[in-house]
Amino acid sequence: MKEMIYQTVCPGCNIGCGLYIRENEEGALTVDFMKSSSANLGKLCRFGMKLPHHYSKATSMVDGKEADIDAAVKAASDKLKGTRNVTMLAVGATTNEEHLGFTKIADALGTVVNTGIGAYEEIPSECHPSISQGIPLDDIENAGRIALFIDPYVQYPLLVRRLLAAKKNGATIVSLTCCDLNLADENVSINPADYKTELGLDSNSIIITDVNPHSDAEQVKNLLNLALVTGSKIMFMKPFVNSTGVHLLGKSAGQIGLHDIMDGINDGSIKTLVTLNSDLLELMPNTADAAETLEKLDDLVVITSIDGPVNEMATIVIATEPLYAKAGSFMNVEGQVLNNSGESTVGIDAMSTLSQNLGGEAFDFQAMHSKMMESVVRKFTAPKYSELECKVMETAAPAENSGNLISVYNPFMWCNQTDDNDFVIVNMNMVDKLGLQKGGMISLTSDAGSVNMRYTVRDIPDGLILTMKKLPVVTGNTTEVKAEAV
Ligand code: SF4
């Protein structure tokens, strides 16, 4: 094989940073910068720089034995034919075209594709486009005031340069995150009921938050309301490379979130699950709990380009080509369609065969690409911010933090990749209270187990511990842990 160079997009989050992947004759990968990419101008965060580690190639399997892709598709067809109550999940970690192919399989099975974000279920559908569509990243640089509900350094790193540019242009930044942010002019903690009066937002302001599978619907509503009553723009960042595309392509009615899927498996109402590049062992807060739940399925059919941990549990794995090699497109958080230079259609072709075997439509890449252009690009691509279409909603109080250990979701955590940031964050009061020693460890114990971690000190509220890594003691967004010095 000669060396190949692919123009592609980082799958770490929905900013959609452009880059090149170089694959040498032995199959080894390296990353090259793409200065012409408007989303990131050639820059990448730590996750983007470590992408070669992320692209572990999947192998097709049937009942735990290696198989070729045709045999895996046939086995999946035999399993799914006539099966009722199939649940399908695709969070947006692959191309628009593959997602559309997956929806054709859902049509054949008489179901919908769930994108896994439970908050959508509780928010009126007229608000969904406002959550799905973002604003041009350049608009951030021209805002007068920015309210940050996410930690850009940890969660969406390429936002930082936009925020610094905004400050240079005269913006003030107010942060409502757990950690005080150096780039913020004000770091505050405000009750949602007081956002409108205390944040000083107006039509020249931008609210930046995110929506992910573990988001609290009440907080999403609160922030939409805040945008409506202040006239501010609002930007929902999202964790998966094609989160925006799949929300615009999908049928929002009848969708359920990841937590409902896991509940359905636990109560026996979901027996068969089909996933597309969506590994529940990585996506759920506690891997061991998620594995215990997935064991209860009769059949788990995994269509994926990654050699993820869930593949070992699957009844059938249909292995597709690596994301960088696929023909296809993604839609980033600002509504830009970004195209891969790859030309491989292994995944689409496998899904077409599966669809036909189930009595559904045949399709090819070109048909899916044309449909995507028609149904998404012409309707939704946002060269400028669109006014919110929803009305102010009734809200309840956001869910109380029920624990002292807070998970700060970030690209490494969503993909369960190792990272150098192998520590938790505490404040000086906790160091003194627990008697933590310089260079020592902190022991964390919850109902799920124990772990010893290195720690670093930052200015965070008393009593809290932040983790940017998936820990075995974690049971949700927040977890009650007992902390001790080791
Ligand atoms: S993880 Fe997000 S911010 Fe980092 S390089 Fe990838 S797309 Fe860009």
Image: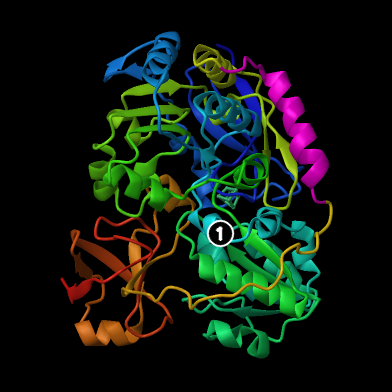
Amino acid type for the residue under numbered disc 1:
Val
Give me the residue at 76% from left, 64% from top.
388
Secondary structure that dominates the magenta span: helix
Indicate the position of residue 328 as horizontal and vertical percent values. Answer: 67, 28
Note whether 166 is above or below 3 in the view shown.
below
Determine the image quadrant of residue 478: bottom left
Note whether 342 is above or below 50 in the view shown.
above
Q: Viewed as shown, does residue 220 lie left or right of 66?
A: right
Task: Decide: few, some or many residues near mark 1? Use Cα within 10 Å; few <14, some 14-19, many ≥20.
Answer: many
| Placement of the N terminus among the 4 image quadrants | top right
Note whether 293 is above or below 204 in the view shown.
above
Give me the residue at 67% from left, 20% from top.
365
The reply to whether residue 144 is in sight is yes
Determine the image quadrant of residue 31: top right
Indicate the position of residue 401 as horizontal and vertical percent values. Answer: 38, 75
Query: In the image, which residues are magenta?
Result: 360-382
The reply to whether residue 416 is in sight is no
Q: Viewed as shown, does residue 160 lie left or right of 378?
A: left
Determine the image quadrant of residue 467: bottom left
